[in-house]
Amino acid sequence: MWTKPAALKKNNLMTMKKELFIIDDDPVYRMIISKMATYIDADVTIHHCEDGEKGLQRLQSLENSDHVSVVLLDINMPRLNGWGVLKELENHGFESGHHPSIYVVSSSTDESDMAKSKTFKLTKGFYIKPLSVDDIKSILNECDDIKAGDH
């Protein structure tokens, strides 16, 4: 079996595209998170989705992608909320192939929302708004960990 030399593997990891999807109906929140993320990592590509339906469409287009993707998913949105997005992704077998790291974000401090987020295989964590620079750094650092070998 032929395997890529270490130098080629490293080069592919270095050029692997890193993407951040902000799925939230608040345009000010999306802008702030976008600015924070690009301040932390100028190479990250930001995708803005103003509701769950548009976010779901964008995420489903990733199914055969080899990009490293992180999602900040709001719970309360019009048209399709965050729980609906997660259910749709899991119902269509998204967790069995390539999938992004999804972080549920909410202004809710309700313990039941935090517990519910843990019931989805696709979620990596729950953050309460507003997110800090350290929160964004931690989330984007996971992208780097995936690029380095977990992908």
Image (cartoon, rainbow, N blue to C red):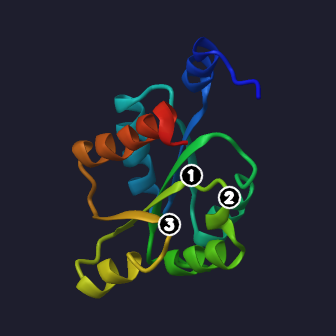
In the picture, measured across the screen, residue 44 lies left or right of residue 65, that is left
Return the disc, 1 or 2, that comes first in the chain's sequence. Answer: 1
Question: Whole-percent x and y of residue 79?
Answer: 62, 80
Q: Quadrant of residue 53?
A: bottom right
Q: Locate the C terminus by quadrant.
A: top right
In the picture, measured across the screen, residue 115 lies left or right of residue 134, that is right
Residue assigned mark 2: 97
Crowd around label 2: few <14 · some 14–19 · many ≥20 (10 Å): few
Question: Whole-percent x and y of residue 36?
Answer: 35, 39
Observer-nearest residue: 10 or 49?
A: 10
Identify the disc placed on residue 81: none
Question: Whole-percent x and y of residue 71?
Answer: 50, 55
Query: Of the residues tagged 2 and 3, which is closer to the observer?
Result: 2
Residue assigned mark 1: 48
Return the disc, 3 or 1, that comes first in the chain's sequence. Answer: 3
Query: Can you say whether 145 is above or below 114 in the image?
Result: above
Observer-nearest residue: 133 or 50?
A: 133
The residue depicted at 53 percent of the width and 78 percent of the height is: 81
In the picture, measured across the screen, residue 138 lies left or right of residue 43, that is left
Residue assigned mark 3: 25
Query: Can you say whether 148 is above or below 135 in the image?
Result: above
Q: Secondary structure at mark 2?
A: loop
